[in-house]
Image (cartoon, helix red, strand yellow):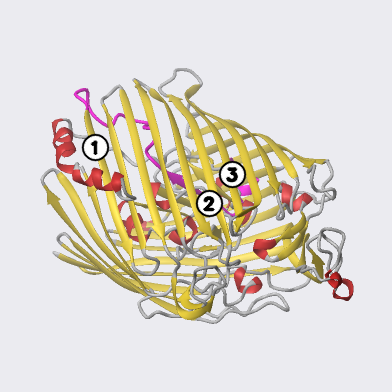
Amino acid sequence: MNRFSLALVSVGSLSYLGALAQQAPAAALAPVTVTGNPLGAADWIAPATQYSGTELLLRTKTTLGETLDGTPGISSTYFGPNASRPIIRGLDGDRIRILNNGGAAVDASSLSYDHAVSTDPLSIERIEVLRGPGALQYGGSAVGGVINVIDSRIAREALFDAKGGVSGKASLAWASGNAERGGAGVIEAGNDRYALHADAFKRRTDDVSVPVALSCTRPGAAVLARRICNSASDSQGGALGGSLLLKDGYLGASVSGLRSDYGTVAEDEVTIGMKSDRYALQGELRGLSGWLQSIKGQLVRSVYQHTEYEGAEVGTVFKNRGTELRLEARHAKLGALDGLVGWQTDSVRFSADGEEAFAPYSQTRQSAVFAYEELSTGWGKLSFGARRELVRVTSLGNPSVARFVPARRSFQPASYALGALWNLPQGWQATGNLSYSERAPKDYELFANGPHIATHAYELGSPNFAKERSRNLDVGLNWRHGAHRVAVGAFVNRFQDYIAQQATGRNRDTAGNGAAAGVADCGDGTSAESGCVAELLPEYVYIQVPARFKGLEASASVRLLEGPTAVDLQLRGDLLRARDLGTGQALPRMAPARLGATMLWTHGMWRGSVGASHLAAQTRVPSGQRASEAYTLWNAGLSYRLQAGTAKLLWFARLDNARDTLAYSATSILSQTAPGKAPLPGRSIKVGLQGHF
């Protein structure tokens, strides 16, 4: 069977399975908000965004970061087209929690920019993004926000009536810019007592087309071509899940796997082979009597590994194995007060073996209790949240690297939040959030000491770091009337001990020695003077500094034409300023000011759009770093829905970077460590078909 086998079989089966589904129509399920409000309320006090359905399909790209990039307040790390993690309000790495159905998503993406997130957009049903401090129930590490990728692998409600039935969807897509060939399929079956789920996807891409000729030293590749060298990828994955549906609750389990082989664009001959397996057990009991109204639990086990290959040889092997247990109990209402309490514990064990083992073996254990409460009032509502953690970070050394020695640090972070929502006249709502957050330093921030080839740096941590503490304020104003909507927000985050990574101006060789007189150790007791080849790397150290992040975010949609043909103008924009208050310097890799506009029209089964995103030049950079130039990217889209028997089909086409503009990301570390190496993708047309039955 070829690479599209599963998707083709699924599409070919639409009519047959659609007939089965017609015998027992699927129930219409209300959206389940897992992240934005743990009590399920429709109004979110913290600024939040969700993508699902056609909107998610039409913006999906090869990485989670690029899929969300352009949302007000959200940019991406962009380490080429295969590794891109979301950045929220200038905060990235471990200040952003990436969840899967509200549970941990364990990988190594926060450790290094060239490490991909272990979630592929093709397998996602919905994405929820919670910006700001409103997600403290997920830990002080969520000070920047939470991204929850949601799938339907564990059903929480009955999908069909007692007679049972089958439903599903399948999709195929192709893109010109990277020769993407992808397909995905989902099948669900069951009745009112059980639900079964199966899904799979496959995608392959070639090197990405760009508007400028770039050099390449990879064997078999053109020496000079208008493509990003070593940017091809091959990904596949799938899952099985099932649920027992009770009168007042459910118990479900799922097992999923992801395999991805991709090139790291900073080095022409280095590729990564990633493997991620996830096992989840989840359940809930509702309708309980007494003080507890419901109890929900989730147990997740993740096994992650990726191997970096230098040509055909194995370079460094990274492993991350984690287990998380989370329990939440919703209590009975106390007058107008509604809320929940919870307990969470997790353990993650990390190892790295090989030339790029810049951090030691380590184990991080965390336990936490938390509470979230809402008080309804005549004018709106108030929310209260608190979380207390115990975090132990242990360096286990490394038998092959003498400079890594055993060590242990313990922290007791605490986080608190107060929020309010006011219902104002004429459909307006005002929101405000005030919070205090503490984050325990990560293992690599404490114990890193080695060459990190992907970022072309020698990285040094500090085992004496204190907790990272921040005070955060977020205010917003929202309005909705029919098809019209407006959202405006402002925020400021003031860090007392922000952990930043900064260049020292010194160089080290790959053995960790200072590069005095340009002499570098070759790692075998000889030196570069003896004729070997040794690479000198700039030294980057983690330090704690006072820092401030502040910004504005805005979006609006205005209905210009009502009737059989509807026309909407969608506007968006954001502005971010981040500064090291100790030196007065700007913090690195911050998104520039951004403005965007899209004209969207619908007529019957047709939907079309044309728009542009403008990014200003980023000149607010630390001394000695490169500024980025301004650019504007144009895009367009077209889709058409039709009924084919009992199946619903959606044809779609998307044009990205229509003018083939040469642009570089200001938030990518490659703009500093490998300038010119990885521009943003050039002009590309993506076409596809999705079917529901």
Q: Is residue 388 magenta?
A: no
Q: Tag 3: residue type? A: Gln
Q: Secondary structure at mark 1?
A: strand
The quadrant where residue 159 appears: top left
Coordinates of residue 469 in the picture (x, y in percent): 72, 52
The magenta span reads: 136-164
**On residue 305, which mark appears?**
3
Mark 3 or mark 1, which is nearer to you? 3
Coordinates of residue 161 in the picture (x, y in percent): 22, 26
Mark yes or no: residue 239 visible: yes
Q: Tag 1: residue type? A: Ser
Q: Tag 2: residue type? A: Val
- Looking at this view, is 162 or 83 the one in front? 83
Q: Earlier in the sequence, mark 3 or mark 2?
A: 2
Coordinates of residue 544 in the picture (x, y in percent): 78, 59
- Looking at this view, is 420 or 626 the one in front? 626
At 56% across and 62% down in the image, what residue appears? 264
Along the horizontal axis of the image, is 325 left or right of 60? right
Q: Which residue is mark 2?
A: 117
